[in-house]
Image: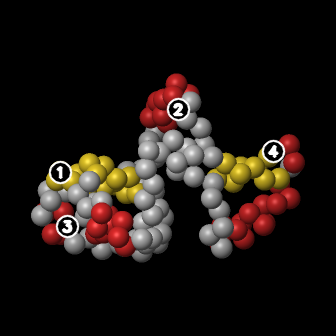
Amino acid sequence: DGLRLGADHYFATSDPDTFEALAGRFDLIINTVSASIDVNAYLGLLAVDGTLVNVGAPPEPLAVNAMSLIGGRRSFAGSMIGGIAMTQEMLDFCATHGIASEIEIISAQDVNEAYERVLASDVRYRFVIDTSTI
């Protein structure tokens, strides 16, 4: 999907060789995953002075190796959703640049099935309920 959406490259993080091949390559990584991951593996992908920003909220604490940060002068940061002004700025930017969300529209009667799919990790995009079906 990434290539279809305009990405120049695709790398499978499920392939351990990916981390070796991309070590030190990125200035910024934005982690949107709300599952527990090996943050240190991703810190290793950062260049000197690179930053990993975590916006996902995993259920368990993330273990960060201090040497992953210190050795490469890397930073690990977090961010929450902005206020109304920042959200409006983001929406304006998206409108100007033709950026839109990938969604799956469901009817109100399919909410329970959608919930089960969320629990089963069988969701690629955000669910949006068609309010005309309520």
Q: Are marks 3 and 1 in contact (CB under 8 Å)?
A: no
User: Mark 4 sits on what residue?
Assistant: 131
Which of disc 3 and disc 4 is earlier in sequence? 3
**How many C-alpha atoms fall within 10 Å of the one at disc 4: few (<14), some, or many (≥20)?**
few
Residue depth check, mark 4 versus mark 2: number of the one nearer the observer = 2
Give residue 61's position: percent from left, percent from top.
37, 73
Q: Amino acid at mark 4?
A: Thr
Give residue 83's position: percent from left, percent from top.
46, 39
* SS category of the residue bearing label 2: helix
Q: Amino acid at mark 3?
A: Ser
Q: Amino acid at mark 1?
A: Asp
Q: Are marks 4 and 3 in contact (CB under 8 Å)?
A: no
Q: Is residue 75 left or right of residue 88?
A: left
User: Mark 3 sits on what residue?
Assistant: 68
Q: Are marks 4 and 1 in contact (CB under 8 Å)?
A: no
User: Mark 2 sits on what residue?
Assistant: 94
Q: Residue at x 66, y 67 (%)?
A: 122
Q: Which mark is residue 38?
A: none
Which of disc 1 and disc 4 is earlier in sequence? 1
Give residue 56's position: percent from left, percent from top.
45, 59
* SS category of the residue bearing label 3: helix
Q: Residue at x 55, y 44 (%)?
A: 5
